[in-house]
Amino acid sequence: MSPPSAPVRFRGEVRTTAVLAAPLVAGHLSTGLIGFVDNVIAGRHGTNTLAGVAVGTALFWLPMMIPMGTLMALPPSVSQLDGAGRRAEVGPLFRQALWLSLALGLLLFAFLTLSVHALAPMGIAPEVRPAATEFLHGIRWGIPALTLYYCMRYLCDGLHWTLPTMAFGFGGLLVLLPLGYALTFGAFGFAERGAGGLGLASSIMMWAQALAFALYLVRSRRFKALKLFARFDPPRRHEISALLRTGLPIGVTVAMEGGLFIVTALLIGRIGELEVAAHQIAINVASLCFMVPFGLAEATTVRVGHAVGSGRGSRGVRRAALAGAALALATQALSATVLLAGHDAIAAIYTRDLAVASLAGTLLLFAAAFQFPDGVQVLSAGALRGLKDTRVPMFIAAFAYWGVGMPLGAGLGLGLGWGPKGMWLGLIAGLLVAAVLMARRFLRSSRREALVGVTQVQVTKGA
């Protein structure tokens, strides 16, 4: 039989990527829905609670993106080992990644404990600070569990097994919904805790997810041959350093992009609670939309890494990336259409405050405008991670988001007094520049990095 034609191979790659990405997308959507539940509960409790949760969430996720992104070194590392037929090395690598995730979680816990003292120097409106402090005091206890959860999740993703991401994501949602309501409003015998109750409920949810995931890995037959918990391995500097060399630039890149949105929220927090509440609604909806291309990007990372490990060359690498790009552009077109058509109706779900809902609806139009550049930049970054090309994308992110997006947004929003609308124009500009530069970087790297990736696998095997 003759080998399949290029269009047939491409359609097959699209199907494979779609099957791999579907649970990832669902899992990310469940994470986005957790934010949705947080914001709806907070918004229904009061505008002040919503504003406090907005600032607290920003201060939580800004540093959290560094360990989350750093642990993204695990999927391409695991997928390259899998593609090269070296599954026996996955267990030892995973155990070192667990040590790294625990250390990152404890560092972040300490950071958040101290961060509440920065609210006043940052210029956060005085009426917002108490609720933000209470939220941070509650959610910080779940951080070590969250970093361990990401480590276990990324292991499964790298092995092309993404259903646990979806299952445990929605499982967490089922825990948060009743518990968040009870602790925020005071129900089912619990005292009313407002924003602090919502933070505590989120922390409990994170520990439930991490413990359930660990139990699954121990008992699942799928992972039995990998011997993930067969023995105790002490931390090893060489393996952890290798993960950090690949992962830390990813963490900085993710923090650069996420930080653009988060610092935007903190700057808007200087204006007043109405503006920050409206921004929180719009950014939560935009984040929900982002979960789809983010899941596709993670699947693309795995497919590109597998292509490198199996030695399929630059054509196989590009085919994997283009399959993800085709899916991302289709989904982004859908999300942009939904935002354009239903921006006011979506904003009304979150709050009864007409002024907040009106401004949030306007900001959702800006969110519709950046759907395509957001999809292109995250997909390109995911493909580059599959090649373990992480340092140059870090500098691209720094330039696009902090050399273009943030100065423009701050200048328009605060300097010229355009408020949240000016800040969102800065978001659009930063994402557009990142999309162009990330895509260009992948097209350049894919000509040569596939061979480099094979060499790296061979060197690692020799070591």
Image (cartoon, grey):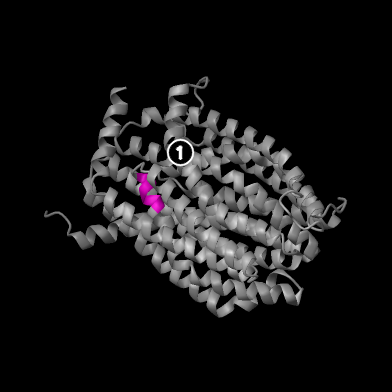
Tell me where the magenta segment starts and ends, as one range: 381-386
Label 1, secondary structure: give it: helix
Secondary structure mainly formed by the magenta segment: helix
Left or right of 417, for residue 429: left
Residue 1 on image: x %, y %: 11, 54
Q: Which residue occupies the foreground of this view, 19 or 47?
A: 47
In the image, residue 361 lies at what x, y percent?
63, 75
In the displayed structure, 293 sits above or below 333; it is above
Residue 440 locus on image (x, y percent): 32, 56
In the image, is residue 404 part of the stretch drawn in magenta? no
Q: In this view, does 39 lie to the left or right of 258?
A: right
Work out which residue is located at the far bottom of the displayed protein and give it: 341
The amino acid type found where label 1 is placed reads: Gly
Q: Which residue is drawn at 64% across and 56% down?
A: 34
Q: Which residue is drawn at 64% across and 65% down?
A: 414
**In the image, what residue occupies the spot 69% across and 50% down?**
175
Would you say residue 359 is visible in this rendering?
Answer: yes
Relative to 424, residue 213 above or below: above
* Point 34% across, 35% down: residue: 81
Q: Between residue 402 and residue 183, name the one nearer to us.
A: 402
Side of 34 relative to 247 (left or right): right
Total marks placed? 1
Q: Is residue 177 visible?
A: no
Residue 355 lies left or right of residue 78; in this view the side is right
Residue 432: which quarter of the image? bottom left
Instruction: State the residue position of label 1.
Output: 247
Q: Where is residue 263 in the image (x, y as percent from the top left)?
A: 61, 55
Q: Is residue 407 above or below residue 154?
A: below
Residue count near mark 1 (Cα–Cα under 10 Å), binned few <14, some 14–19, many ≥20: many
